[in-house]
């Protein structure tokens, strides 16, 4: 999912229609973990990433390529888009799919929800205008405590899911944090150019890795439900989701748009329970609660206003 640094001020209250778009986006991005969990059982992670980014890039080129100066702007920023495609698509998507070979859609989405926590920590180190506040510090502590609850049992060897799979998804969240800090340099560039450019770049990055590591031409043709999951992952949860996200960003601001992070885990968990037979332990539910409180604190929504 696209990442943005958390701004200092709150955006204006959102309208009912914007809330509807935000909830829809949460369902779509929650669905991405569900679709990935279905597909990764039959398609190796690197090949799955290649399918996701290349099909999404093709869809966005067809949708926006005729706009004036679209390709001129894209080509002028290609070195930066290559870096963004690496840290915002290629690396995190690969790590998430690797993790999802062992863990369910719900748990993966919860671990990925720690992204804003890493964004704040990385911004504190790498930027001068995103320094940490008391609310952000509290949010980081709560969120990291939730992550420890989720990973702790595996680290102690008392959980069924392997530690490396959970750490892979956390690594994806860290990569998104670096992408958020790096993405500041695209201020003033059309979000459509940025989205299309980074997906095109990540397609070029993933192509040789998928060919060398997975040798996809040797793989059996996946079942129809897997093909449908791949198409949904690329066209719905990537291409369309980018368009929807940037629409929310334009009308409600980055702070309100960042609330989608809270909506993704519940939808992924619900889909996993309904269709994949997944369950969450009490520890995992407590971890989700702490992460949610941490994100709300980072967003300043738990602050008490003084009269």
Image (cartoon, grey):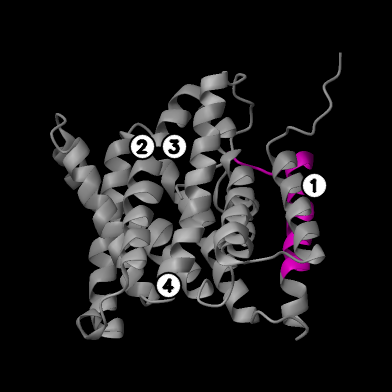
Q: Which residue is mark 3?
A: 245
Residue 199 position within the rendered picture, expressed as x and y whole percent measured from the top left: 30, 53
Q: Is residue 125 visible?
A: no
- SS of the residue at dot 1? helix
Can you tell which of label 4 and label 2 is closer to the viewer? 4
User: Mark 3 to mark 1: distance in Å?
Assistant: 27 Å
| Labelled pair 4, 3 in contact (Cβ < 8 Å) | no
Judged left or right of residue 152, residue 52 is left
Q: Residue at x 30, y 58 (%)?
A: 53
Residue 2 position within the rendered picture, expressed as x and y whole percent measured from the top left: 45, 47
Alpha-carbon neighbours of circle 4 within 10 Å: few (<14), some, or many (≥20)? Answer: many
Q: Main SS of the magenta segment? A: helix
| Labelled pair 3, 2 in contact (Cβ < 8 Å) | yes
Sequence-first tag of 3 and 1: 1
Is residue 147 rendered magenta in the image?
A: yes
Q: Which residue is mark 4?
A: 40
Residue 198 position within the rendered picture, expressed as x and y whole percent measured from the top left: 31, 52
Is residue 211 rendered magenta in the image?
A: no
- SS of the residue at dot 2? helix
Query: Tag on residue 68?
Result: none
Sequence-first tag of 2 and 1: 1
Say which quadrant the C terminus sits in: top right
Judged left or right of residue 229, residue 132 is right
User: Mark 1 to mark 4: distance in Å?
Assistant: 36 Å
Q: Is residue 23 above or below residue 177?
A: above
Sequence-first tag of 1 and 4: 4
User: Mark 2 to mark 1: distance in Å?
Assistant: 32 Å
């Amino acid at each position: 999912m696209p990442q943005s640094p958390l701004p200092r001020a709150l955006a204006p209250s959102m309208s009912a229609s914007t809330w509807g778009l935000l909830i829809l986006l949460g369902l779509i991005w929650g669905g991405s973990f569900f679709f990935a969990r279905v597909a990764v059982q039959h398609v190796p992670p690197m090949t799955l990433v290649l399918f996701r980014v290349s099909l999404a890039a093709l869809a966005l080129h067809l949708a926006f390529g005729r706009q004036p100066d679209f390709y001129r702007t894209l080509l002028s920023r290609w070195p930066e888009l290559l870096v963004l495609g690496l840290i915002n698509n290629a690396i995190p998507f690969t790590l998430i799919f690797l993790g999802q070979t062992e863990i369910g859609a719900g748990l993966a989405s919860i671990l990925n929800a720690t992204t804003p926590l890493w964004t704040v920590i990385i911004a504190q180190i790498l930027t001068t205008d995103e320094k940490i506040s008391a609310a952000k510090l509290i949010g980081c502590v709560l969120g990291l405590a939730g992550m420890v609850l989720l990973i702790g049992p595996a680290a102690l060897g008392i959980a069924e899911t392997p530690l490396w799979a959970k750490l892979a998804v956390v690594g994806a969240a860290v990569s998104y944090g670096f992408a958020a800090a790096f993405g500041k340099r695209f201020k003033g560039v059309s979000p459509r150019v940025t989205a299309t450019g980074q997906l095109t770049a990540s397609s070029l990055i993933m192509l040789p890795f998928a060919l060398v590591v997975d040798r996809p031409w040797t793989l059996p043709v996946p079942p129809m439900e897997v093909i449908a999951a791949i198409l949904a992952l690329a066209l719905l949860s990537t291409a369309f989701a980018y368009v929807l996200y940037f629409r929310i960003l334009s009308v409600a601001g980055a702070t309100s748009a960042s609330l989608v992070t809270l909506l993704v885990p519940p939808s992924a968990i619900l889909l996993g329970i309904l269709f994949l037979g997944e369950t969450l332990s009490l520890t995992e539910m407590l971890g989700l609660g702490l992460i949610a409180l941490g994100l709300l604190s980072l967003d300043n929504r738990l602050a008490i206003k003084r009269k």
